Structure formats: structure tokens, C-alpha cells
Amino acid sequence: MDDPRQTHEQVTLGVDTHAEVHVAAALDERGRLLGTCTIPTTAAGFRELLRWTSQYGELSRVGMEGTGSYGAGLARWLRARDVVVIEVDRPDRRTRRRRGKSDSVDAEAAARAVLAGTATAQPKAGTGAMEMVRTLRVARQSALKARTQAANELHALVVTAPDAMRAELRRLKIPQLVATAAAFRRSAELTTPTAATKLALKSIATRYQHLAAEIEALDKHLDQLVAVAAPALVAIKGVGTDIASTLLTIAGDNPERLASEGAFAHLVGVAPIEASSGKITRYRLNRGGDRQGNRALYLLAVGRMGWDPATKAYVARRTAEGRTKPEIIRCLKRYIARELYPVLLVMTPEARPGRSPKSSLQTA
């Protein structure tokens, strides 16, 4: 640790987060670097960080990279002690080419982004029902991926199976193929390719059944959590547990961090980006934002195009104006984001996290 210089000013802290250690840099109100330190990612290390910062003055704000990954533990620990935490993007390539790359440089850049006001995003609280939904969705997506892989492997084994077995199994759909393969009897000895293929098919089919049961159990928990946390959201026609849990996970346990419906639209990548120059005024497609949230709005937009009279009329009018289907869907996603934003802000008291920081900073 560097030698502290005693001050009584407001200190802005920047933290570059890692799995085992975090590197912090402290700046005073005028942007002068006060010092840097390295702490372990433990509760003792977090306490040491506050003690070290107190030598320079009163801790004002903490800018941090990776509040949703390596920095999640420190962010929760600081927020529980009413310390304002601001999420900071990693430095751009131009900055890194000019200043180089090191943990202390990244930590200082995070602190300067907060001090300059270019970083204002409030991270997710991660202490309530939405964090529960997020963790269950991680497990469900992993199980879905593994089940899909098992289904593909079943088909691949059938393609190369001995002729008699292939003729019997090749036209079966996945549910029938899984049931048939899982019912194969185990051979006492593997003396032929047919016996080995049957054992392999039975093993994969059994795995598929276990994964299906796991997904079903997770779905039941997600249905219950979402229904309790946001009944107004799932009450909207077309919004099921999958779409609702996706949007709630993006909003987090403190959806008020989203300052406006425009901020939410940017977060899910449905806000057009201005690309005007000179006499030309135009907007381009937003390719950023959370892609899972964008997918949820896409599914809802496509569904409404099939059953909602107002959406059908809108599609017909925009088509007559010469708009293409992808352009119309992009517009619909933006309108849906505007419609869902106030609903996402409404969360039942049972779903609210126990504590919230004093910060009034919100996502730009």
C-alpha cells in the first residue's frame, strides 16, 4: 500500500475486480491520485479497504468494474453499509493504447469515470427475489443446453446404428425415441456393436429424462417466484414465465435504477441510435443491450402480430408505407418496451430486498 496523505476531503474510489484480489485506487475531489491498494476478495479484505480509504478522508462513491461478476460480493457488502456503488465500463481501446494496461491503471480509470460523471449506472441490488430468479434461470438454461445436446447425440447414434436398430428407431420423434431407448435392457456382456449401441442410447436417454425432470422442477419454482414478485407483469396477455423472468432479471431487485423508459429501451437494445450528420437526419439499429431481453421483446412482438387486432392494424399500415417486416418488428419492440417499463417498476413488497443504498444516482 502507498503512504497515505492525511486529508478530510471526499474520496472517490475505483476498483478493478478479479477472482482472488481486487485493486483499488483513491482520488481526492480535484482528481489527484491518493494511493492504490490490493485486497483479497474476503470480508476481511473488504473491511481493510474501508480502513485504508478512511486515511484519506470520507468515502464518497465507489466506481467498480464487474458488479455482476467478480465484483458482486464487494458491491453487495458496500451497499449493505450504505456506500454508493456505481457500475463502470471497462476502459476503451483508445485509453488503453495511450495509458497501457494494469490493474492499478484500470482502478484509477474507474475512479476518474465516476468523478467526471461519465459513469452513473447503479448496479443491481442482487439481494431479493429477482436474484433468486436469475440464479434459477442460470440452472435452467444450463439444463436446457444439456438436454438439447443429449437429443442431438441420440439422433447421431441412431444414424450410425446397426441396420436393424436404425430401421426401428430412425423415424421416431424425440419423446418416443427417449422412451424406447430408456426401456432397453442392459446386456450382461458387451460382445457386439448392437449391444454397445443399446447401452449408449439407454445412457443418453436416461440422462435426457433426468434433465427434463430437472427443468420441470425449476419451471415450477420460477412460476411461483414470478407470480408472487410481479403479478401485474404475468397478467399481460402473451407474457409467460419465460419472458417475465427474463425482463425481471434484467431490471433487477431495484428497477428504480432505470431512470426512464428510454433507459430501459437502451438496456434491452431496442432504442434507435441517432446517426445524423450535416443535412441528413437518420437513426441506425441498436446492436447493443441485453440480448436475452431483446429476444423476450421479439417473441412478444411476433406473438402480438398474430393475435392482437391493434398490432395487426399497425403492421398493415406500416407495410402500406413501405416498411419491411424487420423494421416493423423493431418499432413494435420499442413500443412494447415503453408499455412494460411502468409495470416492471411495480414489485410486490415481498419481492423487495431488505436494504437499499442512500444513492439517488440512476442509470443514464
Image (spheres, rainbow, N blue to C red):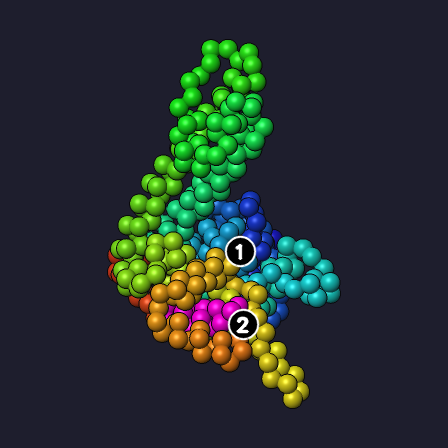
Amino acid, disc 1:
Gly
Residue 95 in percent (x, y) is at 69, 65
Instruction: Say whether residue 272 is left or right of residue 109.
Output: left
Secondary structure state at the residue bearing disc 2: loop
Res 163 label: none
Instruction: Say whether residue 176 is left or right of residue 194.
Output: left
State the residue at coordinates (31%, 45%). 220
Main SS class of the magenta portion in the image: helix
**Mark 1 neighbour class, 10 Å CA radius: few under 14, some 14 to 19, many 20 or more:** some
Vertical order, 193 against 32 (above or below): above
Circle 2 residue? 324
Question: Which residues make up the magenta segment?
Answer: 325-341
Q: CA distance from mark 2 to mark 1?
A: 38 Å
State the residue at coordinates (53%, 68%). 326
Res 66 label: 1
Q: Is residue 66 magenta?
A: no
Residue 122 in percent (x, y) is at 45, 65
Front one among 231 and 173: 173
Q: Quadrant of residue 288?
A: bottom right
